[in-house]
Image (tube, grey):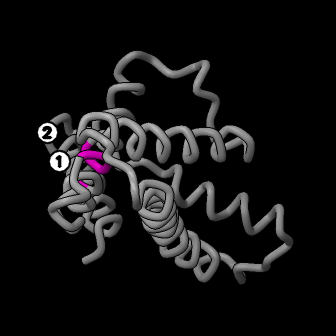
Amino acid sequence: MTRSEDGSAVLNAVSYLDVALRARPASSTPESVAGRLADVTHVDLGPGDEAANRRSGLGPFLGYAMGIAAGAGFGVLAARRRIPLPLATVLLGGGVMATSDGSMTVLGVTDPRTWRRSDWVSDLIPHLAYGLSAAATWRRLRPTSARG
């Protein structure tokens, strides 16, 4: 696993653990984002069940793609810098959270202004887990002389 795949796996694990612990339903926003993106780009996902199945596959795929892209971008930007682990965690986790929440807002899938405190916590904790995991892996993979 790359550093960003590791972070994305941790984000999903923390999210599913939250679902299990609080007995809340899984989020449908990834599938909604996939559907809205298909609508906006005029991509036909097929009829009925085929479209639903494609949305359910594309939603998580888009999340992984965002996590991988964020990790790769961070790696390029931070390659020659010493960034403390807590700062790298916030930059990675906060950056992915802002990007995902921003894109969902622009697509009309959600409106963060209507979120309750528990909604924000449910979003923040997995993204910080992503950031910590990706940042710790990034730090571990760097040469000893370059670690911050």
Mark 2, other Cα within 10 Å: few <14 / some 14–19 / many ≥20: few
In the figure, 87 relative to 7: above or below? above
Q: Is residue 79 left or right of residue 140?
A: right
Would you identify the image quadrant in which residue 1 lies?
A: bottom left
Numbered range of the magenta stretch: 129-133
According to the picture, the residue beneath numbered tag 2 turns out to be 21
Looking at numbered disc 2 in the image, what kind of residue is underneath it? Leu
Front position in the image: 102 or 139: 139
Residue name at image x 36 percent, y 33 percent? 124
Q: Secondary structure at mark 2?
A: helix
Question: Residue 108: x percent and y percent?
Answer: 73, 41
In the figure, 114 relative to 39: above or below? above
Residue name at image x 40 percent, y 27 percent? 119
How many dots with numbers? 2
Residue name at image x 57 percent, y 78 percent? 54
- Reply yes or no: does residue 119 show up in magenta: no
Residue name at image x 46 percent, y 66 percent? 72
Question: Residue 106: x percent and y percent?
Answer: 74, 41
Looking at numbered disc 1 in the image, what kind of residue is underneath it? Leu
Question: Residue 11: x percent and y percent?
Answer: 29, 52
According to the picture, the residue beneath numbered tag 1 turns out to be 17
Q: Secondary structure at mark 1?
A: helix
Front position in the image: 135 or 64: 135
| 1 and 2 marks in contact (CB < 8 Å) | yes
